[in-house]
Amino acid sequence: MKLDTIHQKKYKEAAKRAAANPEEPSIKPFVALDALLKEIEKNGFMQMIDLDPYFGETSLPFKEQTDLLAETYPEAFAFFKAFIDDLQEEIELHFEVSEMYEDEEFDQFVEDMKVIKRRYTEMFENDYREKMYDFVVKVLDDTV
């Protein structure tokens, strides 16, 4: 995420603190945010939610990070939590509507999930990037 010069410096400083002591309570929100940002930059939302195609159960690989940020910043992070909840709900609904995929339809299931996640990645870029920027600035201002 592109930040202004001041917040780029704060980000680097927070990253150094995190590398030195990631378990420090005051740096944990930054560590969680950094993990989310790196994942979004690398994969969009392709790895943010997993769905077991046989049982329809979802898992959130970044649940610990999102829960920590939602707990620490309930109002400021609510937009992202709602966004992830919407993505999870859409995936679960798609699974319910399409019933259980047969083994030969598994490739179609995987493709359907990719389409949904790509659409949410694009939606995030278009509609939520600015909110995330503001949130990053808030976390950095609180951390450094």
Image: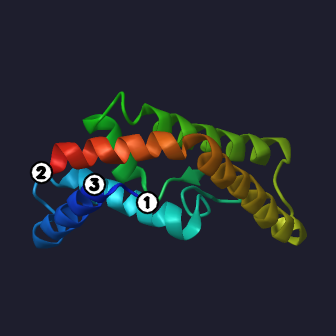
**Element carrying mark 3:** helix
Name the amino acid type tagged 2. Answer: Pro
Residue 25, labelled with which disc?
2
**Element carrying mark 2:** loop
Q: Quarter-wise, where is residue 132 in the image?
A: top left
Q: Is residue 68 visible?
A: no
Residue 136, percent from left and from top: 35, 48
Numbered disc in front, either 2 or 1: 1
Q: Which residue is mark 3?
A: 7
- The one of 20 and 14 positioned closer to us in this rendering: 14
Name the amino acid type tagged 3. Answer: His
Residue 109, labelled with which disc?
none
Measured Cα–Cα span from mark 3 to mark 1: 9 Å
**Element carrying mark 1:** loop
Which quadrant does the N terminus fall into?
Answer: bottom left
Residue 49, percent from left and from top: 57, 55
Q: Residues within 10 Å of mark 1 (few under 14, many from 20)?
A: few
Q: Residues within 10 Å of mark 2 (few under 14, many from 20)?
A: few
